[in-house]
Image (cartoon, helix red, strand yellow):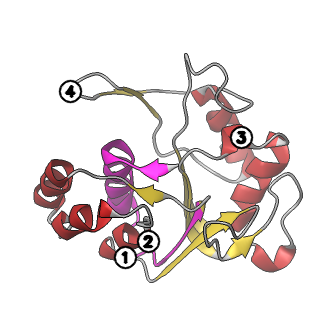
Amino acid sequence: MALNSISAELLLHCRKLQPKATDSIMLGRQWLRLSPAESARLSQEHQLMLDDLADAQMSDTTYAEPFFQRMGFQNIEALDVTTYQGAGLVHDMNTPLPADHHEKWDWVFDGGSLEHIFDFPTAIRNCAALLKPGGLFITQCPVNNWMGHGFYQFSPELFYRAFSPAHGFRVRFAALVSLSQPTVYHLIRD
């Protein structure tokens, strides 16, 4: 799992929706994978110093926390099933999250973990429980032609129902991203 230019663009867009958020948690500790050209483009388009982050990626130990720091987050954590990659919160998302972890995060970012968690209903309830009131759940996941990648391929309909007003949420936007050159974004309505 890694932040690439598409996920970085998504997060920078979401930052405009909630500019005062200070606390963010990632499902799985995300690698940072931006080329120098991508970093320069994002820096210019979003008035954010990111150029040096591409230079730091020469090692395989560059994680996404510096990217979140540049966006202004003060408390950045990773949640994973093990401490293997240095996650600060260790929990199996197949089981209910203990109440002492509820409502602590302005952002919950899933950069490609949920499709690998067998008990998806419990995992998505855990994601919702992590959020502070008014917080953002941000996910990116493969939706088509990724046979053999994880347990599931999700439809936008799933997220529109799971994060519906009936459950105390609202979806700010959903989009499908075509990995063509250039990247094409398709907004998806409920």
3 and 2 marks in contact (CB < 8 Å): no
Whether residue 26 sits left or right of residue 186 in the image: it is right
Secondary element at tag 3: helix
Instruction: Using the image, tell me which numbered label, if any, was put on residue 182.
Output: 4
Contact between labelled residues 2 and 1, with CB atoms less than 8 Å apart = yes
User: Which amino acid type is shown beneath numbered disc 4?
Assistant: Pro
Whichever of callouts 4 and 1 sits on the residue coming sooner in the sequence is 1
How packed mark 4 is, by other alpha carbons closer than 10 Å (few <14, some 14-19, many 20 or more), is: few
What's the distance in space between the residues labelled 3 and 1, CA to CA? 27 Å
Residue 21 shown in magenta:
yes
Q: Residue at x 83, y 65 (%)?
A: 97
Density class for disc 2 (Cα within 10 Å; few <14, some 14-19, many ≥20) is many
Nearer the viewer's eye, disc 3 or disc 1? 3
Residue at numbered disc 3: 116
Residues under labels 3 and 2: Cα distance?
Answer: 22 Å
Say which of 172 and 75 sits in front: 75
Circle 1 residue: 69
Mark closest to the chain's N terminus, 4 or 3 = 3
Indicate the position of residue 83 as horizontal and vertical percent values. Answer: 70, 70
Q: Position of residue 185 (x, y in %)?
A: 32, 29
Alpha carbons under labels 1 and 2: distance apart:
6 Å
Mark sitting earlier along the chain (3/1): 1
The amino acid pointed to by label 2 is Glu
Residue count near mark 1 (Cα–Cα under 10 Å), binned few <14, some 14–19, many ≥20: some
* Magenta stretch bounds: 2-26
Residue 98, above or below 17: below
